Structure formats: structure tokens, C-alpha cells
């Protein structure tokens, strides 16, 4: 089920380079999106998970979801209090979305919808983004789970960078005159 979330915090972004989980398994792009307990979008995600599970497992959905929601490895949607040592997770739910490298990188846009690259410096961990994703139920030889595919991310606004770094800003630099000598820059 496709969903769009707005103004959520970005954590652990791997948007421009596919990585392996703990150095093992297939390569994928991904990120985690933090949604405040009080955010109305939390109810939208809860409803989508329930609807997708019901479509997949019918009458057994409730029983399966009970187990899936308790296992952070089987569910893309967990309470942030289960990760107390991570910046920004307190008071939030965390939605983790992945995209297989074979599907190509997710769309990453600026506020004006222009494409962003790794060299852009955004989006970064701690900023606010809008995100397009697809929630689906997994039922295969690896088990039953609720997963989320990352479709695209749009930078929305700056936020305090997780990990203590500051958000990048052009205001951190002086304007240089054309033809400035190297000695003048030091």
C-alpha cells in the first residue's frame, strides 16, 4: 500500500549508495523515518499495516500481526523506546524502509523537486523530509513480516543533525571575489 508521509525526521539514510545490512546479504538503499507519537500520520501507518496484513492473511492477520509487531526484525514499524540509545528516537515511532539495489536508487529531491545527489549535503540524518513508500506483507521461506519499500525522499527542512554535527549551510562560508589569490584564502 503506497503512503506519503510529510515532515518526518530522517535517520540512518543510505539514499545514494546501496549497502549491506551489517556487511551481509543483498545490497539495498534505505532509511528510517521518525514519526512523533502525537503525529496523526502514526494512525495512518497503523491502519495501513493492518489493512495490508488483512489483505494478505485474512482472518489470521490479527494473530500474525501480534507476533510480527513484537519482533523488531519482522516489522518495519517499531516504537522508538525500543532503541533508547539512538538520537531522536525518544517519543517517536520508527519506520524503516529499504529498496533493493536491483530496483535502482530511490528518487531524492530538494524542496523545489530538483534532484539531489550525495554531493548536495542533503538530506542528512536529523533533517525533516517527505517520503513516498510502499508497505507490504512478506510471507515466504524467511517467514512472515511487515516490510516497507522506499520509493522516494524529498528534503523538507533543516533539523538538528543526529550525531552532534551541524546542518550544512552556505552561510558558513564567505563570498570570494573573482581572481582571489591563494594566499588571501589562508
Image: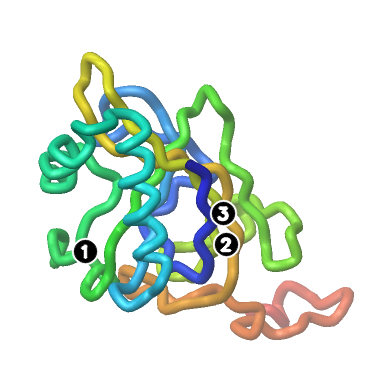
Residue 180 % position (x, y): 82, 77
Mark 1 in CB contact with mark 2 (< 8 angstroms)? no
Quarter assignment of residue 116: bottom right
Structural distance between the alpha carbons of marks 3 and 2? 14 Å
- Residue 16, can we see it? yes
In the rendering, which numbered label is found on residue 80? 1
Q: Residue at x 55, y 73 (%)?
A: 168
User: Badges 1 and 3: C-beta atoms under 8 Å apart?
Assistant: no
Q: Can the viewer see residue 73 in this picture?
A: no
Residue drawn at the location 30% of the way across and 23% of the way down: 25
Name the side, left or right, on which 183 lies relative to 28: right
**In the image, 163: left or right of 113?**
left
Q: Which mark is residue 121?
A: 2
Give the residue at x 52% y 45%: 2
Local secondary structure at mark 2? loop
Q: Quadrant of residue 42?
A: bottom left
Q: Secondary structure at mark 1?
A: helix
1 or 3: tag closer to the N-terminus: 1
Quick one: 70 or 101, which is closer to the camera?
Answer: 70
Image location (x, y in percent) of residue 112: 75, 66
Residue at the spot of label 3? 153
Q: CA distance from mark 1 to mark 2?
A: 26 Å
Element type at mark 3: strand
Query: Badge 1, how many Cα within 10 Å: few under 14, some, many 20+?
Result: many
Amino acid at each position: 500500500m503506497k503512503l506519503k508521509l510529510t515532515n518526518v525526521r530522517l535517520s540512518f539514510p543510505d539514499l545514494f549508495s546501496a549497502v549491506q545490512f551489517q556487511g551481509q546479504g543483498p545490497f539495498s538503499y534505505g532509511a528510517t523515518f521518525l514519526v512523533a507519537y502525537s503525529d496523526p500520520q502514526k494512525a495512518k501507518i497503523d491502519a495501513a499495516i493492518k489493512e495490508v496484513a488483512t489483505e494478505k492473511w485474512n482472518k489470521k492477520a490479527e494473530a500474525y500481526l501480534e507476533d510480527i509487531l513484537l519482533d523488531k526484525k519482522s516489522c518495519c514499524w517499531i516504537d522508538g523506546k525500543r532503541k533508547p540509545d539512538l538520537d531522536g528516537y525518544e517519543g517517536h515511532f520508527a519506520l524503516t524502509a529499504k529498496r533493493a539495489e536491483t530496483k535502482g536508487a530511490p528518487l531524492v529531491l530538494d524542496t523545489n523537486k530538483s534532484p539531489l545527489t550525495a554531493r548536495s549535503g542533503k538530506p542528512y540524518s536529523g533533517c525533516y523530509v517527505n517520503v513516498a513508500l510502499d508497505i507490504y506483507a512478506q510471507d515466504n521461506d524467511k517467514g512472515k513480516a511487515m516490510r516497507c519499500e522506499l520509493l522516494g525522499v524529498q528534503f523538507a527542512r533543516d533539523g538538528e543533525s543526529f550525531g552532534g554535527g551541524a546542518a550544512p549551510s552556505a552561510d558558513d562560508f564567505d563570498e570570494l571575489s573573482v581572481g582571489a589569490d591563494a594566499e588571501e584564502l589562508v
